[in-house]
Every structure is written in structure tokens, then in C-alpha cells.
Image: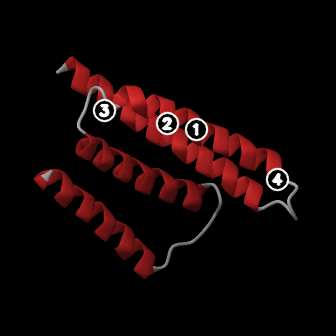
Amino acid sequence: MIDLVLGLSLAVFLSLVVVFGDYLIKIASLQSGFSGWYLLAIGAIVYALTAVGWFFVMRHAKLSTLGVIYGMTCIIALTLLSVFYFKETLNGFEIFGIILALISIVILARFA
């Protein structure tokens, strides 16, 4: 049981690290021309490092369970980041789509 809790906790942490990588790449994309190349490179390194972390996390939980945790964490964290940090707006269809995505992940988790 402790292994499962540890694995799921690490999965949430690694998902948030991936979101940080996405943040760096978004910041790089907002630079003019290719001047944000170093942020793109750092974001890619962050992604690569999370792969090493997933190697250890997958020893403690099923892949299907980790997929659900990863999906939920990324959807929620990226939405919050885009709305509150980047000041992007969501229209009704996007909000509905996010809700459906969360529901689908819950359904997948139920039958996984």
C-alpha cells in the first residue's frame, strides 16, 4: 500500500514537472523569432528528466493508473496555468471539452 501511495504521489509530482516543461516551451514560443531557443532546450531537458522519473514510478503502480493520474493532473494544471498566468480565456465549448475530458478519464479509471 505504501508503494502505491508513493508511486501515485510521484506520478502527480512528475506530471507537474511536465507542466513546468510546457510552461517553459510556451514562454519560448512567445519570444520573437527563435530568441527563446534556450527555454525550448530547457523544456526539452525537463521532459527528458521526467522520463527517468517515470521509469521508477512505474515500478510502484499500474500503467493504466498512472495514465489516469497523468491525464487529470495535466488537464487541470495546464488549464489553470493558461487562465491565471497567461491570461488566456476559455469559451464555453472549451470548458465543456475540458469537463468531458475529465469525465472520460474518470470513466477510464473506473474500468482500468
C-alpha distance separating marks 1 and 3: 20 Å
Give the residue number, with chain letter if any, for mark 3. Answer: 8
Name the kind of residue labelled 1 in the image. Ala
Give the residue number, with chain letter if any, for mark 2. Answer: 51
At mark 4, the secondary structure is loop
| Lateral position of residue 96 relative to residue 80, left or right | left
Give the residue number, with chain letter if any, for mark 4. Answer: 36
Q: Quadrant of residue 85?
A: bottom right
Q: Are marks 4 and 1 in contact (CB under 8 Å)?
A: no
C-alpha distance separating marks 2 and 4: 23 Å
| Lateral position of residue 81 relative to residue 62, left or right | right
Looking at the image, residue 99 lies above or below residue 13: below
Give the residue number, with chain letter if any, for mark 1. Answer: 48
Name the kind of residue labelled 4 in the image. Gly
In the rendered image, residue 54, in percent from the top left (x then y), is placed at 42, 34
Crowding at dot 2, Cα within 10 Å, few <14 / some 14-19 / many 20+, comes out as some
Between circles 4 and 1, the one closer to the viewer is 1
| Lateral position of residue 19 relative to residue 103, left or right | right
In the rendered image, residue 62, in percent from the top left (x then y), is placed at 23, 37
Looking at the image, residue 18 lies above or below residue 111: above
